[in-house]
């Protein structure tokens, strides 16, 4: 293929990839920009093939030089550093306006866990759970963290347990997820489902819509829930204490920087309901060590004024 | 004090009246006939001037007053209940807010006693369902007990009758003054003038009307919370099973007959406009606006919003309360829930007008700031304080003292005997 045509095409496609890459970092997630970036990337790979074919001789010379090894070392070091995400890298990623996974971070420590979510540079949410006396790092409890809207619909799971037996271990969260999947299918089929397909304030699955409401006059309150369970924690009353659920409601029209999650109860199956449903009941005297799994769960929200 | 020394003819009159009321409700369906018993003194009804000597006079037969009167009667006080309307129950029955919340908090019952007995029996007789208090409600109002407002009113009358409480409907106090043995209260109704001599007054008027009549200080907000006009359009109303529709009546004020008239006119006009706009059939309309706010007393103790939200255990606590801080405004309402485990209490001092003797209030007019009052004013809490006021007033009448000086332990003992839950001991 003509050298001038391929070189110009390589440059042009690279330009598009570079611009969309910067936009994808700076601006909130956009399917148009990410789609353009990804598909133009594939085209770029093809064009680069022709470009290499046209420039095979100088390329061979580069590969034989000492710069080849220096380049390889620098690239490997940068890749490792970015993949490991040390603090400076996190800080850089924190500048992004993208809602991608890089801003949705979950970390387990010896004494608890931290979940961070930054839907916009001016809104940073951190959930810090400090484990209690009954927490055994050698046999840690299972837990799930999720967001619900004000109609109590599951919006998004922030942390899911690794166990395959979630339904038995964390029944309330499993029930909520199933309900959500069902509602999503119904919505896709065009069935009018409250809070999912209807033109309601709570029809979004994107947490950013709740944290950064488009209309500040009509914010959408939501709640964050944690279900935690230590399997087989028997006591005199029961063979296995049920899971416990903690919750906090966030309302951007009544902003608080710090909010503690409250213990709201344990799940119990209501078989009289058709179909059977899981409801939350207040804790009673059957619980002892289960109450000590979580020492405290603190939600911190930093809300700065959005920059114009 | 002699227990229940009402004249036999008066009691017969009450029994006949009750039978008449119950019968009248059946007559609609069965067209059977009932006859109201004649006035025992055989006076022409338009000229009747009646005198009563009682131990305890309860003014206002609403949520708190009904319970206060039944309790005073059950404690052995000769009790009279004067009510300006046509039935007992107030906001629950005439206003139609027939979901008296909240009796429970955080998985256990915190208010019981006579109010709960009446609500429970109304629900059971109606074949309704009581909520499971062990279950966490997703919203606070999900533990409301849907109550048949019509049954509640009749059962309340029956319980008053059994407790020996004399009822006077369509009457209200016009003048009150201190006399040697207590109070002289002059009431008027259409065709009726009544002079009541009593040892103790329990003011359950909602707006501390007797307290105002006696010249004690009262509080009133410049802008009061809206009232609610309850109605149902389009579909049949099922009392005791569901909430009805409601619209806010801004400026609603139950301070006097003129403001009440204005609120009712405004509410009904709005309902009519809604019916016309939606082109649906009007299936139900309450006869009166459900008011939220009026006067409150300046009491010996004021319950502040901090006392309320922190669940302060007052030294002289006589009853629990439970509800979110629930201030209704022009822009709607956003309830502020109480923190888990918090159960506010009501001190006896908040029911006593400052500097008064032989006078106690119960219900939403207790001494509290507006935000605390927005949570305290709900029916279960009013029932709890009504029962406590009934005990305090009847014991005071019995021992010749004033409610504030009745030993707290005595009040708690009698309350416990009558099924109430004492703060801190639920």
Image (cartoon, coloured by chain):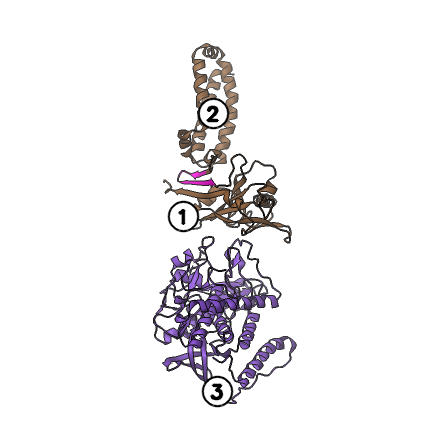
Chain colours: A brown, B purple
Above or below, comparing residue B111 to residue A259 in the picture: below
Separation of marks 3 and 2 at Cα, in angstroms: 100 Å
Classified by dominant secondary structure, the portion drawn in magenta counts as: strand
Q: Quadrant of residue A141?
A: top right
Between B307 and B43, which is closer to the camera in this rendering? B307
Is disc 2 placed on a helix, strand or loop?
A: helix
Please give the residue where the numbered disc 1 appears in the rendered image: A255
What percent of the width, then of the height, locates residue B223? Answer: 37, 64
Tell me whether circle 1 and circle 3 mark residues in contact (CB < 8 Å).
no
Q: Quadrant of residue A163?
A: top right
Please give the residue where the numbered disc 2 appears in the rendered image: A13
Magenta segment: A116-131
What percent of the width, then of the height, locates residue B165? Answer: 51, 77
Chain letter behind tag 1: A
Tell me whether circle 2 and circle 1 mark residues in contact (CB < 8 Å).
no
What percent of the width, then of the height, locates residue A258? Answer: 41, 45
Q: Earlier in the sequence, mark 2 or mark 1?
A: 2
Which-is-in-front pick, marks 3 and 2? 3
Please give the residue where the numbered disc 3 appears in the rendered image: B46
Confirm whether residue A192 shows in the render.
no
A121 in magenta: yes
Q: Are marks 1 and 3 on the same chain?
A: no
A12 in magenta: no
Between B355 and A299, which is closer to the camera in this rendering? B355
């Amino acid at each position: 293929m003509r050298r001038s045509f391929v070189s110009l095409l390589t440059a042009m496609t690279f330009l598009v990839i570079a611009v969309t890459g910067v936009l994808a970092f700076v601006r909130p997630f956009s399917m148009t920009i990410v789609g353009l970036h990804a598909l133009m990337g594939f085209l770029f790979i093809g064009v680069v093939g022709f470009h290499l074919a046209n420039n095979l001789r100088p390329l061979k010379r580069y590969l034989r030089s000492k710069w080849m090894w220096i380049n390889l070392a620098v690239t490997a070091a940068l890749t490792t550093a970015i993949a490991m995400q040390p603090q400076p890298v996190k800080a850089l990623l924190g500048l992004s306006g993208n809602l991608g996974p890089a801003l949705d971070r979950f970390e387990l420590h010896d004494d608890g866990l931290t979940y961070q979510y930054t839907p916009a540079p001016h809104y940073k949410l951190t959930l810090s759970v400090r484990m209690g006396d009954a927490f055994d790092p050698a046999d840690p409890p299972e837990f799930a963290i999720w967001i619900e809207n004000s109609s109590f619909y599951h919006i998004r799971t922030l942390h899911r347990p690794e166990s395959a037996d979630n339904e038995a271990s964390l029944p309330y969260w499993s029930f909520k997820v199933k309900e959500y999947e069902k509602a999503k299918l119904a919505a896709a089929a065009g069935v009018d489902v409250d809070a999912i397909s209807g033109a309601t304030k709570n029809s979004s699955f994107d947490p950013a819509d709740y944290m950064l409401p488009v209309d500040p006059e009509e914010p959408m309150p939501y709640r964050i829930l944690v279900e935690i369970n230590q399997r087989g924690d028997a006591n005199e009353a029961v063979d296995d204490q049920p899971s416990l659920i903690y919750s906090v409601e966030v309302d951007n029209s009544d902003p608080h920087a710090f909010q503690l999650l409250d213990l709201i109860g344990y799940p119990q199956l209501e078989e009289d309901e058709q179909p059977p449903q899981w409801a939350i009941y207040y804790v009673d005297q059957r619980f002892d060590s289960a109450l000590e799994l979580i020492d405290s769960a603190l939600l911190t929200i930093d809300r700065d004024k959005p920059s114009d | 004090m002699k227990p229940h020394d009402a004249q036999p003819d008066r009691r017969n009159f009450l029994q006949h009246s009750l039978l008449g009321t119950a019968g009248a409700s059946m007559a609609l369906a069965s067209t059977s006939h009932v006859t109201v018993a004649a006035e025992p003194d055989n006076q022409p009804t338009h000229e009747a001037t009646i005198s009563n000597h009682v131990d305890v006079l309860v003014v206002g037969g609403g949520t708190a007053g009904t319970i206060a009167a039944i309790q005073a009667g059950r404690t052995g006080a000769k009790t009279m209940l004067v009510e300006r309307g046509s039935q007992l129950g107030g906001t629950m029955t005439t206003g139609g807010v027939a979901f008296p919340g909240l009796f429970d908090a955080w998985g256990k019952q915190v208010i019981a006693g006579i109010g709960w007995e009446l609500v429970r029996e109304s629900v059971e007789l109606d074949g309704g369902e009581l909520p499971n208090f062990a279950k966490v409600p997703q919203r606070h109002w999900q533990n409301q007990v849907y109550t048949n407002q019509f049954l509640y009113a009749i059962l309340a009358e029956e319980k008053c009758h059994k407790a020996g409480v004399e009822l006077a409907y369509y009457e209200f106090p016009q003048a009150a003054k201190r006399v040697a043995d207590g109070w002289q209260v002059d009431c008027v109704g259409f065709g009726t003038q009544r002079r009541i001599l009593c040892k103790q007054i329990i003011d359950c008027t909602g707006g501390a009307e007797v307290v105002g009549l006696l010249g004690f200080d009262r509080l009133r907000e410049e802008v009061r919370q809206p009232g609610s006009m309850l109605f149902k359009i389009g579909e049949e109303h099922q009392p005791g099973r569901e909430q009805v529709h409601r619209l806010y009546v801004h400026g609603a004020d139950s301070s006097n007959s003129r403001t009440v008239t204005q609120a009712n006119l405004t509410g009904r006009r709005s309902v009519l406009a809604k019916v016309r706009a939606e082109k649906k059939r009007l299936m139900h309309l309450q006869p009166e606006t459900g008011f939220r706010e009026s006067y409150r007393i300046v009491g010996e103790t004021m319950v502040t919003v901090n006392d309320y939200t922190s669940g302060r255990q007052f030294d002289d606590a006589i009853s629990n309360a439970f509800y979110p801080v629930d201030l209704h405004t022009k822009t709607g309402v956003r309830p502020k829930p109480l923190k888990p485990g918090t159960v506010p209490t009501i001190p006896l001092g908040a029911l006593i007008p400052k500097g008064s003797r032989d006078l106690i209030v119960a219900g939403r007019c207790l001494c509290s700031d507006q935000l605390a009052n927005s949570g305290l004013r709900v029916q279960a809490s009013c029932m709890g304080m009504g029962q406590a006021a009934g005990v305090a007033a009847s014991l005071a009448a019995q021992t010749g003292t004033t409610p504030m000086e009745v030993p707290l332990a005595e009040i708690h003992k009698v309350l416990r005997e009558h099924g109430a839950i004492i703060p801190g001991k639920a």
